[in-house]
Amino acid sequence: MQNQLLLATILLSFPTFGAEKKFDFSEVRENQTPPGFRSIVNGQGAPGDWKVILDEVPPLMPRLTAQASVLTKQSVLAQLAQDSTDEHFPIFIYEDEVFGDFTLTTRFKTVRGSAEQMAGIAFRIQNETNYYVVRASSLGNTFKFYRVVNGLRGVPVGVDIKIPSGAWHEMSVECKDNQIRASLDGKELINLTDKVDPLKSGKIGFWTKSDSVSYFTDTKIVYTPREPPAQGLVRDTLKKYPHLLDLKIYVPADNPKAPRLLACKDEKDLGQPGGKEEEGAIGEGAIFYGKTKGSVSVVMPLRDHNGDSIAAALIKMKSFPGQTEQNALARAQPVIRDMQGQFQTLQDLLQ
């Protein structure tokens, strides 16, 4: 539920990418860590200290009059720890989505740091030791991209450019397949193609180095929504079992008493909440049966490789004269076993 406060908007009006997410930190209390993220560190030292604070930020829209305020107080994300270890890279990963092609924009400000004053965006993150990053350095006066492979930095690509500390700047990162572009304050400075085993998708996160205290705000990502593997599983299962009228997969949501629809035949229904049957199948491993004119429905748990119930499948089938609950369950069991043979964990269904 808290994650819904953080991600304010999902729009479907962008023909190039299809969806947009805005990270709105105004709903997070001051000095609290935003939900939906995980703090990690690449290299040595402890993870960063990521909190929401208030800071003066220039408005995004031009001033209508000369008397209008130049700065406004707003909630920003801050990395506040000051660990001066050289090989120390705090990353604040957004956990709820994996992105393929996208364009991300954010405003950032490097505030202080004796060893470094850096701010960046890590993307296509596989884990804390494998990812891409674009970062700005106010002490080094550079704007660069590099890839991290098993914790080791590759050859940096970028330019020397003044990036004053204590001032707000805009950074944008665009990924399309293996092409990466990055801009600083509206000027494209990096344009490259990763031709050697490129990362095609991953998570995104805010990034700093060493003792950098850096702020971020007005972050937005426009992206191509990725189909969860569960949707492909539904599509393939419906083809394999033509007697099925419908198949839906529900997974736990933020509120465990309201599972959400992850995959189904009619994709316009995606995201709809489940009912008590789906809740019972996920939470208790229960099985439910229902019958209407011409069809029967069975709700059964989907189990991971440990046998734990992680999702619920609603299977709707054509009925026939003499249809009973027992033979309906017997018809559904092979479908469930077949589906369970194609994943091991809940994560395998999600991404």
Image: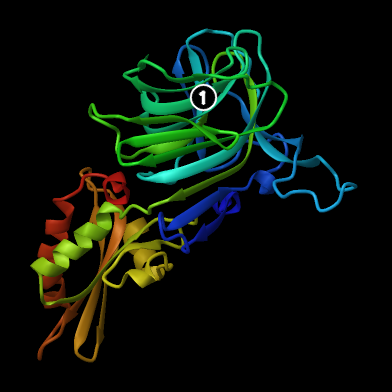
Q: Element under label 1?
A: strand
Left or right, residue 282 beside residue 106: left
- Identified by mark 1, the residue type is Arg
Quarter holding residue 268: bottom left
Question: How far across and how far down the image is residue 47, in percent?
Answer: 52, 21
In the rendered image, the vertical position of residue 111 relative to residue 168, given as above or below = above
Q: Which residue matches tag 1? A: 135
Q: Please provide percent x and percent y for residue 262.
A: 34, 60
Quarter of the picture containing the N terminus is bottom right
- Can residue 285 be seen here? The reply is no
When asked about the image quadrant of residue 71, the answer is top right
Between 68 and 348, the residue placed more toward the observer is 68
How many other residues sit within 10 Å of disc 1, few (<14), some (14-19) or many (≥20)? many
Where's residue 332, x and y in %?
Answer: 15, 69
Q: Position of residue 89 (x, y in %)?
A: 49, 19
Specify whether 194 is left or right of 62. Answer: left
Say which residue appears at 27% left-offset and 31% top-offset.
Answer: 198
Residue appearing at x 47%, y 33% in the figure: 182
Quadrant of the rendered structure where residue 316 is?
bottom left
Number of marks in picture: 1
Would you say residue 73 is visible in this rendering? yes
Q: Nearer the viewer, residue 68 or 54?
A: 68
Q: Residue at x 53, y 27 (%)?
A: 120
Residue 10 versus residue 247 in the image, above or below: above
Q: How is the image coloured?
A: rainbow
Q: Nearer the viewer, residue 138 or 93?
A: 138
Q: Is residue 171 above or below residue 268?
A: above
